[in-house]
Image (tube, rainbow, N blue to C red):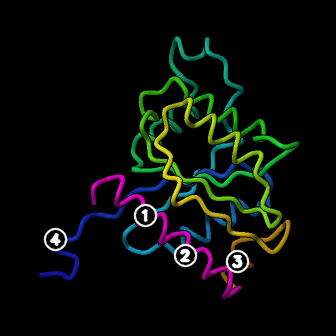
Amino acid sequence: MSPDAGRAPPLRVLGLSGSLRRRSGNTALLRAAARLASGDISLTVYDGLASLPLFNPDDEMEALPASAEALRRLVGASDALLIACPEYAHGVPGPFKNLLDWLVGSLEFPDKPVVLWNASARGSHHAQDALREILRTMSARLLEPAFVTVPLPGAGCDEADLLADVSQVALVREALGALTRELARATGG
């Protein structure tokens, strides 16, 4: 018998970065987490934010744009969402709000477990507060005990920078542990 026999399949987590920057700390955090995730979690980082058209409710009346349909399929296939979103002008960046708008009318999103990670070294909270409000309105199941701040060393860090820093790796592993515990509780695992 294999060592994995009887073991539950990993929880499928979709990582959503709220940043379009090429060297985004939020995206780097999610990619590092995907590399460090244990066998309990399969973390995939969504890379289609820039391809989503501007949301228009009229576009939901017929066939969805392909990129919006693909996003909804990914959300539907995921057991949970992990969001790392920067703050701009004390709020949620427009492209990420647009992503959320494409999910408002979806059947895949309501009651989806969602965790927020804050990658700001300054502990910015305005975007996090706004996201909580938006996600509650969208009927997300917020797993607040797994919300963490992983202060990054500065703007422009990438996945390799994070993985090369022992203290950053420890913070990410600790955050993944909190995520794993809360997802197990939320999914009855």
Q: Name the residue under label 1.
A: 42
Residue at 61 percent across and 66 percent down: it is 31
23 above or below 63? below
**What secondary structure is marked by label 4?**
loop
> Does residue 90 appear left or right of residue 178 in this picture?
right
**What secondary structure is marked by label 1?**
strand
What's the CA distance linking mark 2 and mark 1?
16 Å
What's the CA distance linking mark 2 and mark 3?
14 Å
Q: Where is residue 57 in the image (x, y as percent from the top left)?
A: 62, 15
Residue lying at the far right of the rendered structure: 89
Point out which mark residue 162 bears. Answer: 3
Q: Main secondary structure of the magenta part?
A: helix
Task: Pick whichever of labels 2 and 1 is earlier in the sequence.
Answer: 1
**What secondary structure is marked by label 2?**
helix
Q: Mark 2 points at which residue?
A: 174
- Residue 169 is one of the magenta-drawn residues: yes
Q: Where is residue 174 in the image (x, y as percent from the top left)?
A: 54, 75
State which quarter of the image contains the N terminus. Answer: bottom left
108 above or below 121? above
Amino acid type of the residue that numbered disc 1 sits on in the rendered structure: Ser
Residue range corresponding to the magenta coloring: 165-189
Amino acid type of the residue that numbered disc 2 sits on in the rendered structure: Glu
Residue 91 location, quadrant:
top right
Q: Which of 165 and 73 is in front in this view?
A: 165
Task: Pick whichever of labels 1 and 3 is earlier in the sequence.
Answer: 1
Judged by depth in the image, the label closer to the viewer, 2 or 1, is: 2
Task: Pick whichever of labels 4 and 1 is earlier in the sequence.
Answer: 4
Q: Name the residue under label 4.
A: 6
Give yes or no for contact between labels 2 and 3 (Cβ–Cβ under 8 Å).
no
What's the CA distance linking mark 4 and mark 2?
26 Å
Amino acid type of the residue that numbered disc 3 sits on in the rendered structure: Leu
Amino acid type of the residue that numbered disc 4 sits on in the rendered structure: Gly
